[in-house]
């Protein structure tokens, strides 16, 4: 799956399980930031768009950014619940 098709695939998957995609917050982990020749953060965030989302650069093999991404997701969930 290419970067630009990820949000579309997530939307389809959520609809298939009966969830409203617009009500689901996401945190996109911009992974493998330690590798050469990767897309810039600006390039990735320009195609990874979602109603309520955030982004976190990660190097999962080293655990860098992963806890922060989970914290951001929990914050988004909490703020979404407050709006309901």
Image (cartoon, rainbow, N blue to C red):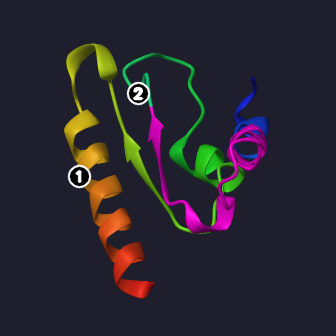
- Mark 2, Cα crowd under 10 Å, few <14 / some 14-19 / many 20+, is some
Specify the quadrant that holds the N terminus: top right
Q: Which mark is residue 71?
A: 1
**What residue is shown at x 23% (from left), y 52% (from top)?**
71
Mark 1 vs mark 2, foreground winner is 1
Question: Secondary structure under badge 1?
Answer: helix
- Mark 1, Cα crowd under 10 Å, few <14 / some 14-19 / many 20+, is few
Estimate the spatial distance between the alpha carbons at disc 1 and disc 2, rounded to whole Å. 19 Å
**14 lies left or right of 31:** right
| Image location (x, y in percent) of residue 33 | 41, 27
**What residue is shown at x 65% (from left), y 55% (from top)?**
19
Question: Residues in magenta?
Answer: 9-30
Q: Earlier in the sequence, mark 1 or mark 2?
A: 2
| Image location (x, y in percent) of residue 50 | 64, 60
| Image location (x, y in percent) of residue 55 | 44, 51
**What residue is shown at x 64% (from left), y 46% (from top)?**
43
- On the image, numbered disc 2 is attached to which residue? 33
| Image location (x, y in percent) of residue 10 | 68, 42
Residue 10 sits inside the magenta stretch: yes
**What residue is shown at x 37% (from left), y 65% (from top)?**
76
Specify the quadrant that holds the C terminus: bottom left
Residue 2 sits inside the magenta stretch: no
**13 lies left or right of 80:** right
On screen, residue 16 above or below 76: above
**7 lies left or right of 29:** right
């Amino acid at each position: 799956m290419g970067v630009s098709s990820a949000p579309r695939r997530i939307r389809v998957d959520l609809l298939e399980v009966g969830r409203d995609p617009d009500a689901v917050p996401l945190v996109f982990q911009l992974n493998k930031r330690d590798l050469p020749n990767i897309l810039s953060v600006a390039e990735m965030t320009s195609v990874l768009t979602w109603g309520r989302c955030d982004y976190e650069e990660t190097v999962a093999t080293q655990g860098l950014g992963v806890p922060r991404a989970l914290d951001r997701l929990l914050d988004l969930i909490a703020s979404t619940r407050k709006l309901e």
